[in-house]
Image: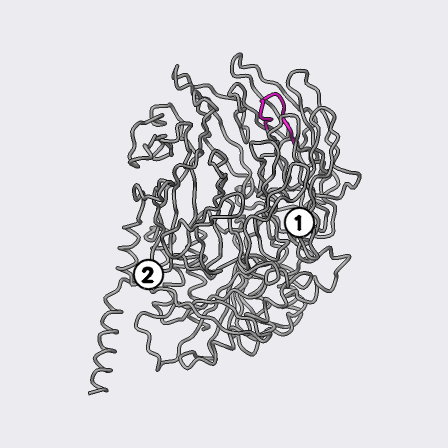
Amino acid sequence: MKYFMLGVGLLFSSLWAQAQKQITIDDIYTNYTFWSKSVYGINWMNDGRYYSTLKENKILKYDVTTGEPVETILDGNSLADVTIAGYEFNADEKYILLLTDKQSIYRRSYTAIYYLYNRQTKELQKLDTERIAYATVSPDGTKVAYTKNNNLYYVNLANKQVVKVTNDGEHNKIINGSTDWVYEEELSFTKAFFWSPDSKKLAYYRFDESQVPEYTLQKWNNGALYPENYTYKYPKAGEKNSEIQIFIYHLDDAKKVQVDIGKEKDIYIPRINWTKNPDVLSVRRMNRLQNQLDVLHANANTGVSRLILQDNADTYVDLELTDDLIYLNDGKHILLASEKSGYKHLYLYTLEGKLVRQITQGNWEVADFVGIDQAAKKKTIYFTSKEESPLETYFYAIDINGKNKRKLSTHTGTNRVNMSNDFKYYINYFSNSTTPNTVELYATKGNKKIKELENNAALKAAAKAYGLVPKEFYDFTNATGETLHGYMLKPANFDPAKKYPVLMFQYSGPGSQMVLNAWGGSNYYWHQMLVQKGYIISVVDGRGTGGRGEKFKKQTYKNLGRMEVEDQIASAKYLANLPYVDATRIGIWGWSFGGYMSSLALMEGADVFAMGIAVAPVTSWRYYDTIYTERFLATPQQNPTGYDNNSPTTHAAKLTGKFLLIHGTGDDNVHFQNSVALQNKLIAEGKQFESFYYPDRAHGIYRGHARPHLFKMMTQFVLTNL
């Protein structure tokens, strides 16, 4: 009877598996069968009862109490040749600034055509006859500032007069009001000008990148007889950065005041913003090694600055801490985040830099500071945290005195929150390993759900029709006794008596997290396709990843790649000892930092990995940029062994497994040079491998059907070699 039931079970499993639709590359990357819907572009309006969003080229106004649209604020389809890509209201919501015809430059930078729409007169005004960038309405709604050709401008809306604030902007030399390449990529901003609260001043960055070394990309798809050279400034580790200056421009008399940011020029200014006082600018300053963060207050009239706060680390100060700094409306206090307790928490200081109290505390991390309701009697702070598990994120409120902490999230998994300006409502974006993105509208008082805005019913149906399998979370202990978190995807008709090949996927970069109780993840549907073909997928976050405090994250400092590879090898050995894993058929792959890791793991772990794929990998940190690389390794002059000991180019002779190396020749971030260098080393060592390049494709390898082509090629490589 026992054997009969086992046979029936296997029969039904086999029939069930055959009944599921088979996932194809075209389903994923061409037909977007598994497209996850969301609610995008939420703009909370002055009347807290309403918010607006962009949908089908229309700006729609929604009633928060019902979640229903009540007005079409602007129908872009009624405007000649205008497709709205983004929009912004002025302070009194009389004008709408429309962003159209957006053309990307790098990851975040772009130029566009901007229009100003008068809601009362229905007049549509083009801001400039040329392409411009980062147009921003002044707080009083009377002016718009923007950048063009490396210079800063503003226009008076009343008389349409355009004022050119700077005149020395020059390509590959001087940039005013926007960022250079490395600031854009690693400090995550491009708009480098800021209106004062009284709209009378513009604070802006000036980058002198004339001494920064250049890198040249060749463009092949222009159809010309000769390829085009594109040269831009890219500071590789240890090389010269741009010299930064901060200026404050006074609109009344066109006076420019230079802010004193110190005598040392080899520094970073990761953020500036105005305090509640329109005559005081807040400047965040970091030394080149990024282990000291200073908060300066600068007098807008004289440029004189003084040190208010300082945060130090033996390793590095995490970049995200530069964003979590809020000046309270009372003009007397500052709310900020720090890891000085060993975990990211929120602190209250006086405006003069004296600690008042630590607000959140415990052996867990604040994930995101959401906002502070300063109108509330006890000033309520809203944040998300990892308190319950590093794998999950929940929404909390706490009084500014550090008391009365309460959990607002009702769903188990990963929650992200967008609150209204008056904090009376919030939109919760939620998912877990079995539930795709679900968007819900809540009233903060009573934590009452008003309406479900999106439930991804179509994606749920597709997941069921194609038999997507859930994540199975697991832990194991590495060689140093630390517990590592992972998850597996197993075939739907999984038979523990069989032996399965395993493909490991990871990113492993500092502070990153791939193992989360959330829907999907990077390349999730391709992994599901491989699961249908009989593979187990495994994902593990090793040492150096995030969500577990400063010690766990920063232990890889100055030795990037060593512990991370050890943990991926340990993961492979753990899997190899499972009774249902074929120990001779374990592979690993990754992209970017993950490609660096898969290359190094395949070489250092030649005894456990049979196959590896590296997409757009760093192969020597000497080839990567200053800000990112030096944050984790110091400079190559200070730490040469940290750069070279864990470079795939150093270990090329150890390669024995099947290896596929892929890169885009137009990658402005991780240069194609990385793959060329590794190929040369492999050739010199007599190692056979496969490689493929994508002409002119950037780091993400999109455009011109590149994504489906890439994953069809990778699929065939996995099927053939694992």
- SS at circle 2: loop
Q: Residue at x 31, y 35 (%)?
A: 65
- Say if 446 sits above or below 550 in the image: above
User: Residue 326: image x %, image y %?
Assistant: 57, 38
Label 2: few (<14), some (14–19) or many (≥20) C-alpha neighbours in 10 Å: many
The residue singled out by tag 2 in the image is 23
Quarter where residue 498 is shown: bottom left
Q: Amino acid at mark 2?
A: Ile
Residue 108 appears left or right of 631: left
Indicate the position of residue 339 as horizontal and vertical percent values. 61, 53
Residue sitting at x 44%, y 47%:
704
| Mark 2 → mark 1, Cα distance in angstroms | 40 Å
| In magenta stretch: residue 51 | no
What percent of the width, then of the height, locates residue 488?
42, 68
Left/right placement of residue 581 relative to residue 218 reads: left
In depth, the one of 133 and 551 nearer the eye is 551
Depth check, mark 2 against mark 1: the one in front is 1
Q: Quadrant of the N terminus?
A: bottom left
- Residue sticking out furthest to the right: 263
Q: Which residues are magenta?
A: 195-204
Residue 159 x/y as whole percent: 53, 12
Residue matched to label 1: 627
Which of these two is toward me, 204 or 86? 204
Which of pointers 2 and 1 lies earlier in the amino acid sequence? Answer: 2
- Answer whether residue 198 is magenta in the image: yes
